[in-house]
Image (cartoon, rainbow, N blue to C red):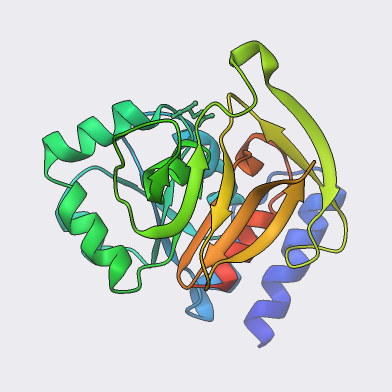
């Protein structure tokens, strides 16, 4: 306890004098209380470094996942935004599709952002090819139009945070319907844009492109 207090004081003094502290306080706390989680990020394509930055910022360890063996060392995994068709093809080509599906089905916590949501959906209403197909949601790809129809807005998502969160939509999908067992977390203009089912969490938007880590903390709280 004394050690923690000393590190905290050093950290505060460094902050006041705008000195970069050599010990990251959050990392240190997580390390000594054994709460540091290894959070995988599917590492083929898309918003990988943005998730990596946020994971580090809240004191956990990011692992860029490209090989099936890496699934054994992580506590949860993020499927980032990007291009779902491309990611689906690479998942198949690298042999990661089957083991990843198996891990998720046996309880590995997963958060799909945007293209990640598409990868997880059991049904795609405007595409005949599904990918992991593990979550009981039907999803419309590019539901808001093309790249130039991308937008940002703000909203309170009560399950996640009492404060407003910035929601960034980039050629985003939305959920058109859900089956029993899926909890809706956020709707925008009558469309479902965040939901969860057991160990699976999905968002149409990109919290990792903002400075707000509330959504990531919410995901980590489920691990
Ligand atoms: N439109 C992309 C797709 O269908 C998703 C866009 C994103 O992840 N920002 O895969």
Residue 169 figure quarter = top right
Residue at image x 48%, y 54%? Answer: 137
Most foreground residue, 7 or 146: 146
Q: In this view, does 62 lie above or below 33?
A: above
Residue 26 placement, left or right of 72: right
Lateral position of residue 90 relative to residue 124, left or right: left
Q: Is residue 177 left or right of residue 75?
A: right
Please provide percent x and percent y for residue 183: 61, 68
Up-down: is 23 above or below 138? below
Residue 203 visible in the picture? no
Residue 75, position as x, y percentages in the image: 38, 68
How far across and how far down the image is residue 27, in percent? 56, 62
Residue 153, given in percent of the width and then of the height, sits at 82, 35
Compared to residue 208, the image places residue 221 above or below, namely below
Please indicate whether residue 54 sits to the left or right of residue 167 in the image. Answer: left
The reply to whether residue 194 is in sight is yes
Asked whether 103 or 185 is in front, the reply is 185
Which image quarter is the N terminus in?
bottom right
- At x 63%, y 39%, the residue is 205
């Amino acid at each position: 306890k004394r050690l923690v207090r000393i590190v905290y004081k050093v950290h505060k003094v460094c902050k006041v004098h705008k000195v970069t502290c050599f010990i990251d306080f959050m990392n240190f706390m997580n390390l000594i209380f054994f709460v540091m989680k290894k959070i995988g990020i599917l590492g083929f394509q898309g918003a990988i470094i943005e998730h990596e930055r946020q994971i580090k910022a809240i004191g956990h360890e990011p692992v860029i996942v490209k090989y099936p063996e890496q699934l054994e060392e992580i506590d949860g995994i993020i499927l980032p935004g990007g291009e779902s068709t491309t990611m689906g093809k690479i998942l198949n080509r690298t042999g990661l599709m089957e083991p990843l599906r198996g891990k998720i089905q046996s309880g590995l916590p997963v958060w799909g952002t945007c293209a990640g949501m598409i990868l997880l959906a059991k049904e795609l209403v405007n595409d005949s090819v599904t990918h992991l197909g593990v979550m009981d949601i039907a999803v419309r790809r590019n539901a808001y139009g093309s790249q130039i129809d991308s937008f940002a807005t703000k909203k309170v998502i009560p399950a996640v945070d009492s404060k407003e969160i910035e929601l960034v939509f980039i050629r985003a999908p939305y959920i058109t319907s859900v089956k029993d067992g899926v909890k809706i977390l956020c709707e925008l203009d009558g469309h479902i844009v965040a939901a969860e089912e057991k160990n699976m969490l999905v968002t149409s938007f990109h919290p990792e492109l903002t400075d707000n880590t509330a959504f990531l903390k919410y995901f980590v709280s489920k691990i």
